[in-house]
Amino acid sequence: MIALVVVLLTAIITLFVNLMNSRWSRPVATLGLAIALGTCFYDYSNPYIDATEMLYFSHASTIFSALTILLGLILVGLSEYSVSYAGKNRGDVYALMLFSLCGALILFSYSNLLMLFLGVEILSIPLYVLAGSDKDNLASNESSLKYFLQGAFATGILLFGIALIYGASGSFSIGGSHENTIINYQLYSGGGLTMFNMGVFMMMFGLAFKIAAAPFHFWSADVYEGAPDAVTAFMASIVKTAGIMAITIFLLSIGFLNKQWEMTFAIMAGLSLVVGNFSALKQMSFKRTLAYSSISHAGYLMLGITINDPIIIPTLWFYLFAYALSTLVLMIGMNWVAGHTGKHDFTAFNGLAKKHPFLSALMAVAMLSMAGLPPLSGFFGKYFIFAEVFNHSAISKDGGFWWLVLVAALNSVISIYYYFKVIIAMYFSPSVTEAEVPSMPKINLVVLTIICLALLVAPALVNQLYGLMFY
Amino acid sequence: MDGSTVNIIDAEWLKFAGIRFTLGYDGISLMMVLLTNLALPIIVLASWDRVYGQSPLFLGLSLLMQAALVGVFLAQDGILFYVFWELALIPIYFISAIWGGENKNRITLKFFIYTFFGSIFMLVGLLLWKAYGSSTNGFAWMSLVQSQIPSNIAFWAFLGFALAFAIKLPLFPFHTWQPDTYTVAPAGGTMLLSGIMLKMGLFGFIKWALPLVPHVGENLLHFLSILAVIGIVYGSIIAIKQNDMKRLVAFSSMAHVGLIAAGIFTQTLEGIQGAIIQMLNHGITAIGLFFVIDVIERRMETRELTLLSGIAKVSPQFAVMMLILVMGSVAVPLTNGFVGEFILLKSVYDSNATLGVIAGLTIIFCAVYLLRMVQFSLFGPSNTQNEKFTPLTWAEGLGLGTLCFFVLWIGLNPDPFFGLTERSVANLLSLFNSIKVMP
């Protein structure tokens, strides 16, 4: 809870600092996020639940908050180059990112559908602005408009779903100690259940839009590609984490309600995997490829959620940790290279390993982790999800979703093809660009190295994570 | 030693998921580790005079490879085995793709995706084995082997394992990645691939796939033996027509490995013993043959048999060593190949006479294509180009000499090598026989 307050205050302070001197805005925002990360430790030992049971900061939600604050810290801290497009207004960009982060923190801890709605809006509205924050760039404007129009539509559906659920159950609450949670409350007679079902249906689709799950993914490639690199990184890491948790908390709290929703969700997961991977195969642009790959990662995560058991939450955390950190490494590396060569194509990376062996090695490690090669975290993330789904299938009566694991396994093979494009470009292709890519600032390289090392050693610490979440 | 498994290290790793970090060895593992640790220095020697031979990246990747391979052979935990298995893929991919020849990007990526495709299903197989079986100690090998599992699930798990191993070998319909990759990879990479990496597949069959056979019945194994024998004939016939020496040895390797696999699928003491010693032999001769090809290519700048002639006249020492290695590969008595192939053929014949007879063709075919290679390159009138054939360097002499020594040593006195694995194989087979099948 304190972390949320700290992030919010930092955002406001950053806005004012930017008025005085825009050069201070990044240090202030970074410092604020570092403090927020520190306060997560306090939050962890003092779980918070407010009197009206709107928010519940449990152990799990605090650990998720810490992850996103860490991602924000890395993103903002290393953004000297990536946010330089904003010139004197860069403080606004940081402040908007922090406001959006507040929305993410709310989504980890809501126990009331009103807070869910507020969280989604607090998360999204700054993003609409952020996507268009590179004002002179037409692609950025287009990205913002597309995101806003479709996002507003999806939010409308989400809100309609919430309204229907309220109409059916007379409650917004999904957890806490209330007796009258949406699932426990006596459904009003006469069409109540149908209404409730429709509500769940709409909410599921509204939230699926936010995590860019197929078939609600059409916005994501264009929006990811057009938005400034730093904002794309923000969307691919933090927003994805928040969206996944929002949908997980909601669906697990009602236990998917019935088999049909479980099946619908599983099919959406399978579609996301297939659509994301196959669309990524033929892309020329690295950034667009990452956009499609993030759709397929949403598919893996949704596959985990189908087991309909809170035991999956630490696994999701670990998967998101691996995915988001390697995304950050790739996005920061891509931003540096693309910024200096002027294009986001794979060819921009040709021959990078000769000139910048260290940066290339870091990006290669992140790529291998994304592709799910052991012994990196990305592999264990996938592995844990597959294992949980199989374990669930073995004990459940109807066989569970073991077939979806096969789809996911096949897709992770397909994904090698496009993930390795950038490795091939960096290591095995002769350089074609004339543009000189300078070496990255030392501090950035150090941080990226630490991330890559973390990807390597994190699997050894998963035991402790499980202990922390269920303590 | 009594052939039982000795754990070197047994530490907790991922407790909640039932994964332990357990490395241990029995006779079979020791034999494979011996091969790995013998082959790696020779591969480094073989590459020493190449442009990449002394680059830190190549040496680093080779050492990573060695670590991963030893890990594969020692792992006593399913997921640990998988982790090492995949880890071995990364260095070889980079070695092949950085220093490879024409079309390397496409071919190496195909190789990577193909093998990754197989291994991901091995992972699925492992997960099925654990989730549906009654393993009491997570993924620990002993516990998995002794667990009971419904036969329909065991069938899918076995298919997953078999696919991964068959692609690695490669068995007949899954071989399409192999000739291209062997040809395009630099000599060091080809030696790693043929000398050691495909042994991972054979080893995997012995240790990880055979325990599932009691649950699924032997029909699948018969089917696999037929594939292996088809591979023998198919690889041999294609090898006869090759002009590129590297491609020739690549296809011959497919034939040899087919015979080893057929021996494993007999599930007899003889068959598996023969397979294991032949794995060592094949490692030595395959590395040796790719070594001599590289020696020739480095000097004559070609691997085409039609462009070579009479090398024996300019470098008799080289010719002697090449002949010894070829004899080893053809399985002439008193060389290592004979010891292994004889036992393998006998065991295959005993378990299925038809297959045994067809598999026996391998000896004739092998003589045809390898002697053809020798005849074209070593003998005949001396080529004008042959003055380019400088004497062997110390690294080449030492590497080839060591290999020839092993060819003759195993050929003359195979007993210590059989003795190393015999008890372990017997233990393994009695363990498999004691597996209780779910009614």
Image: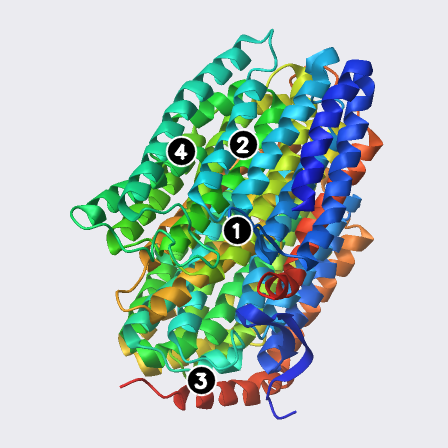
Question: Nearer the viewer's eye, disc 1 or disc 2?
Answer: 2
Q: CA distance from mark 1 to mark 2?
A: 70 Å
Quadrant housing the N terminus of chain B: bottom right
User: What chain does badge 4 belong to?
Assistant: A
Q: Amino acid at mark 3?
A: Gln
Above or below: residue A85 compared with residue A231:
above
Q: Is residue A173 left or right of residue A329?
A: left
Above or below: residue A45 compared with residue B139:
above
Quarter occupied by residue B262: bottom left
Q: Can you see residue A382?
A: yes
Q: Earlier in the sequence, mark 3 or mark 1?
A: 3
Quadrant housing the C terminus of chain B: bottom left
Q: Amino acid at mark 2?
A: Leu
User: What chain does badge 1 belong to?
Assistant: B
Quick check: marks 1 and 2 in contact, CB under 8 Å? no
Residue in front for this viewpoint, B340 or B241: B340
Residue at 27% over, 74% down: B219
Quick check: marks 3 and 1 in contact, CB under 8 Å? no
Residue at 29% over, 64% down: A399
Quarter occupied by residue A8: top right
Residue at 56% over, 35% down: A103
Question: Nearer the viewer's eye, disc 1 or disc 4?
Answer: 4
User: What chain does badge 3 belong to?
Assistant: B
Above or below: residue A228 compared with residue A253:
above
Residue identified by numbered label 4: A209
Q: CA distance from mark 2 to mark 3?
A: 52 Å
Residue identified by numbered label 1: B373
Q: Amino acid at mark 1?
A: Met
Residue in front for this viewpoint, A260 or B339: A260
Mark 1 element type:
helix
Residue identified by numbered label 2: A123
